[in-house]
Amino acid sequence: MPPAVAVLGALLLIVAATASRRYWTWERLALGLAVLNGAFVPAALLAHPHWGAIAHSFLTWGPLPGGLTNSVILLLLSNIGATVTPWMLFFQQSATADKGLTRADVRQGRIDTALGAVFAAISAIAVVVATAPLFTRGVNASSFQGADFAQALRPLIGQAGSTLFALGIFEAGLLAALTISTSSAYAFGEVTRRGGSLNRGLREGVPFYAMLLGSAAGAAALVLIPGIPLVYVVLIVNVIAVLAMPPALVLLFLLVNDRAIMGDLRSGLLGNIMATVVTLFLGRCHINVYWDRCSRTTPHLGLVCVLFPVTGPASQARNEACFPTSHASPTLM
């Protein structure tokens, strides 16, 4: 299928979900897509993984071929940024209000969030396991985009496995476009104090729907740019999320501990300890991105290395300046 057709189809699906003007319909569509994340699990099983090696890797964080290089650190930070992101905070609280949840739904909401986190982690692990055969067999995936992984996996995990993997990639991208564009619209409505809701009519919520559909259309246009390194774009966007998350967590921490606002639902000791650990960890990641990986060796470049990657003949020299201890581009994962 031509990329333009696939992207246009995904955009039309987002428009259809929005046009329903009902949060209930939007949520059911999102949940239906999320279920397809499970496609990665059978794909991983078809890779016939060595369970002992997987357990060893979990316990030792290894082996890491070449050691903990800057490229590996970039990948780790990007995974953190894909897991703990500011847009999730905006989406969670706005969706809670849009759905009409009340104090009586807090317990069920916590269970729902926990189950979603576990399911997302299992899916992410399955992706790593499913693609492991590529690296154990020396396949050079440095220039791969999403679909290339599925095609390269076909002789290793079979037609069924590669098809499931491709389906999972398509679902993940579509679900991300749907939820992040909606989160952007929620945040825009709050910043401009106009509010925003999927339950509003198009005339009542013009700014909200314009931001939602505009964000989705902008993302669609971006991925259709010829030659753009999409994998690297995703990595960098997630690293930026790591940079933006600590301030958001601090504000959230203050909010959930405000007795006047939260009452007896104020965060407890265990929650505060966990929030502090996560915030400090992300703060350390922030320092690592700016100082250890660019500024220490090339202070004149700073975050330019991270925010403005280049491609083509100039990419190798610039990437070596940004990541001097690595002998490969940051896209070589």
Image (spheres, helix red, strand yellow):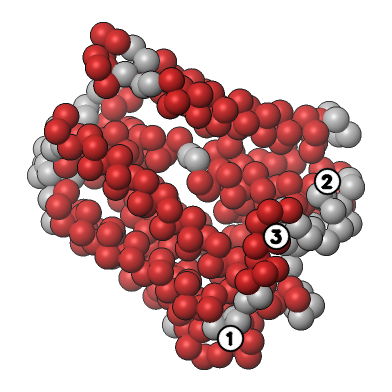
Tell me the distance, in whole angstroms, between the alpha carbons under discs 2 and 1: 34 Å
User: Mark 2 is on which residue type?
Assistant: Phe
Residue under pointer 2: 323
Quarter in which the N terminus is drawn? bottom left
User: Quick check: can you spot residue 172?
Assistant: yes
User: Mark 3 is on which residue type?
Assistant: Ser
- Residue 291, x across and y down, in percent: 78, 30
| Residue shown at 62% from the left, 76% from the top | 49
Do the numbered discs 2 and 1 sit on residues whose CB atoms are within 8 Å?
no
Residue under pointer 3: 57
Label whose residue precedes the other's in the sequence (2 or 3): 3
Residue 30, compared with residue 79, is above or below; it is below
User: Mark 1 is on which residue type?
Assistant: Ile
Q: Is residue 218 left or right of residue 309?
A: left
Labelled disc at residue 10: none
Secondary-structure class at tag 1 = helix
Q: Quadrant of residue 300?
A: top right
Residue under pointer 1: 157
User: Quick check: can you spot residue 286?
Assistant: no
Farthest residue in the top direction? Answer: 260
Q: Quadrant of residue 287?
A: top right
Pointer 2 local density, CA inside 10 Å: few below 14, some 14–19, many at least 20: many
